[in-house]
Image: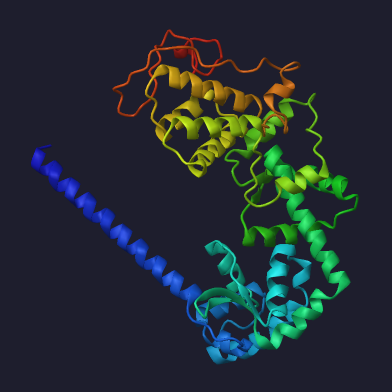
Amino acid sequence: MSGKTNQELEKQMKLVLLGLKETSRKQKEKRYKKYWSEIEIPFTLHERLNNYTKYELDTIRKNLEIKNASSLKKAELIALLQEQIPDSLKQIHLLWDSERFKLLTNAASNGGKIDAPDLEDDQIEYFRDNGLIYTGTFKGKKILAVPDDLIEQIIALKDNIKVRATVNRNTEWIKLTAGLLYYYGTLSTQQMISMIEKYTKETINLRDYFEVIHEANSYRKQTYIDENGFSNIRVFDPKRVKQEHQARKSVSYYPFTKQQLLKAGEPEFVERNKSYLQLVNFLTQNFELDREEADSIVEECVYAARSGEAPSDILKFLSRAIEFDSMETVQAVMDRVVYLMNNTREWILKGYAPAELSAKKKEPLQPLPTSKFNQNDSKKVVKVGRNEPCPCGSGKKYKKCCGK
């Protein structure tokens, strides 16, 4: 291919990328306008529904499982939803947790609005799709708001002891489920129900539980359910995790306390132990990274360790994220990575860290052996001779281990 042809191809690629960026920017602007256009306070349910498109109204209809209404015109559908949405409000506590319930009740108790928290697009869509909470901009501030004609009914829910008890039950189910999967990765349905019953000391109604978890995943995707059972959203191969669990029949699942699981079930939870913080501190002190950037890199290392990745795979990831200037730096980083991996609770180890099982099952991983480093490598990847010891610490030659 000639140089001129290469230049033309490169030019075309740049134009395509610019076009994609422009499309993305326009979509983002359109979405922002949809979510955060000016809104008047107070407003009625009819007024807000009237601002929705027929497609958006149909989404609410489907979400509320209203039958035989697909052919209705917009005005007719709005009239129907005005009847059905207040009825759905009576049942909302059967599915929602305290986070969503508090947003609803706090808005009602504050004259119909509250300042909008930092929500993902999926969460905003979730609220828009149920017809109870609306988003917009009021006096220059992003807000969540509820219709004026629903406020009294919402406050009555807040004051109902039985309603609050059900919401607390749902919250506990959601957090325990997410916490168990944070540490164990994947559990069969039978295992999950058994563990939830153990920690709550109550018999679980399967239908109620599944409906609560399904609704929670519509709001925030922390877990997923398939033929293998329940899995953490970061588990890519649940079948393998289950196989590894079964291969360790003599190892019981790590006995976490209920409080540990509830904490691990919080959104965005990361277990930042001593080994985690040590690597974060090393990265910020020795590379041009702020603490947030370093924390993000180490968090990815932890998830790689949780899923059973080898030290060499983590080193490859790090070599793309940071630039190593010498083999001594590689060694220093790898020492801390190995320490992190030895002290990270792994899915395949049923929630144990390798260091906790080393006496019974295996020796701790060893630090990366010294080997030549190519400073001119544009990708900053460590070069390991095929007859040299493998960087993963297995003790095997590189060509018979990760270099296959």
Q: Quadrant of residue 28?
A: bottom left
Q: Which x, y percent locates residue 85? A: 68, 81
Q: Which x, y percent locates residue 14? A: 23, 51
Res. 92 in view: yes
The residue positioned 47% from the left and 78% from the top of the image is: 37
Q: Nearer the viewer, residue 277 or 267?
A: 277
**Residue 138 vertical position relative to residue 216 in the rendered view, above or below:** below
* Residue 140 in the figure: left or right of residue 1: right
* Residue 188 in the figure: left or right of residue 320: right
The residue positioned 69% from the left and 88% from the top of the image is: 149
Q: Nearer the viewer, residue 243 or 33?
A: 33
The residue positioned 64% from the left and 50% from the top of the image is: 224
Q: Quadrant of residue 109?
A: bottom right
Res. 97 in view: no
**Residue 150 vertical position relative to residue 365 in the rendered view, above or below:** below
Quadrant of image for the C terminus = top left
